[in-house]
Amino acid sequence: MPAPEEAPSPQPAWAALRHRGFAFLWGSRLAATFAAQMVSVAVGWRVYDLTRNPFDLGMVGLVQFAPALLLVLVTGAVADRYNRRRIVAVCLAVEMLCAGALLLLALRASVSVGLIFAVLFVFGVVRAFRNPAQRSLLPNLVPTAALASAIALSSSTTQFAVIAGPVAGGLLYGLGAAVPFAVAAGLFGLGMAFALLIPRPATRTVVQPATWSTVVAGFRFIWHEKVVLGAVSLDLFAVLLGGAMALLPAYARDVLEVGPWGLGLLRAGPGIGALVVALWLAARPVRDHAGLVMFACVTLFGLFTLVFGLSTVVWLSVAALALAGAADMVSVYIRETLIQLWTPDAVRGRVNAVNMVFVGASNELGEFRAGTVAALIGVVPAVVMGAVGTVGVAVLWMALFPQLRKVRHLSARD
């Protein structure tokens, strides 16, 4: 379909916060994401204290990702069939209880790590239901013209939590192993309270009988809607190849020789870049040529990752990671807006469930790929090869998905 010459302009900066429902959803997401980041770093410390086995640190992420993959045909269908606001609130209530369980386990001098993994698996199950419902609820709370602004603000919330949450969790863990879990439980409770305050949105969901056809509707829609398929698969393969976060400890110790403080700088770099750009996009959303901008930023993500992979200077490495995070934030913002804009509300939950599995797979499998390749050919060649692969994916996807390349506006479907 040819793109129109004009489309409604996105609403001005912070316009989404004028809508009461979104403001409560934004507050709920901020509290919950901050709490989740605190739990993540505190659990990592606790597990390593108990076992001194790095493999168990990998298991922390795996047991939380597995439920999203195993339940993908269920979680999205639930988000499309039932009250999304209520799903978010119930899930946050269960996450509060999980944080409380980790608190009790932290008060014990000796505990089986299997119990911690069991609680984390419940966390994973609950988040597998909450994430599609939360993402699908957002477009019901703001008009289409404010959707891009709302997604930019939501992304900035996530990036702020990614930067500040682990720091807060680490500092609180220093006061006592149970302290961060207690604070996280309170934040999950606050997020639940905000979710309950969200006015019931006027969703357009049509309740259909639970058949195999309706369950797999999300996969079917993504396969046939080339704009959505291109956006989702572009992120999957670009991050799968270009992700370098898992190798940062090796870079800090063996390549840059900077120690733990340098590792902290490296880990903060992408989040800082992404946060700055997310705030910029909230004030100045992309108004035209969105598809081309997204492909350009994926290419820049690969190029800046390449610079990081080849760098032996700390300041250049941190700057390259920050710029890579900034470029990735633009592509994430455009991709998420397009997925919400091009997906009918009736299947939005199922589509978002599939999207979350793709996002999780790109991150988790990307770390596995990076570690495996690094073990075979070395740390630097693994990052360089992945970065070049990311640039290649961006070029190839421009040819494979011309509909995505030609998308112009984020305030209306072209």
Image: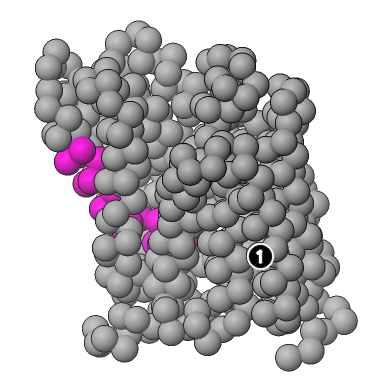
Q: Which residue is mark 1?
A: 393
Query: In percent of the image, x 74 and y 64: which residue is there?
Result: 295
What's the image's color scheme?
one colour
Whether 398 is drawn above or below 390: the answer is below
Placement of 302 over or under 399, stated as above or below: above
331 in relation to 244, above or below: below
Give the residue furthest to the right. 5
Residue 16, visible in the rendered structure = no
Residue 141, position as x, y percentages in the image: 53, 62
Q: Tell me which residue sits at (42%, 79%) in the image.
A: 219
Nearer to us in this view, 137 or 43: 43
Stretch in magenta: 117-136
| Residue 302 coordinates in the image, percent (x, y) | 70, 51
Q: Residue drawn at (55%, 20%), measured in percent from left and top?
A: 253
In the depicted view, which residue is nearer to us: 23 or 34?
34
Residue 61 falls in image quadrant? top left
Q: Would you say 238 lies left or right of 135 here?
A: right
Q: Which residue is farthest front?
A: 377
Q: Residue 174: x percent and y percent?
A: 37, 10
Along the line of sight, the residue nearer the viewer: 350 or 142: 350
Kind of residue sitting beneath label 1: Val
Residue 8, percent from left and from top? 79, 73
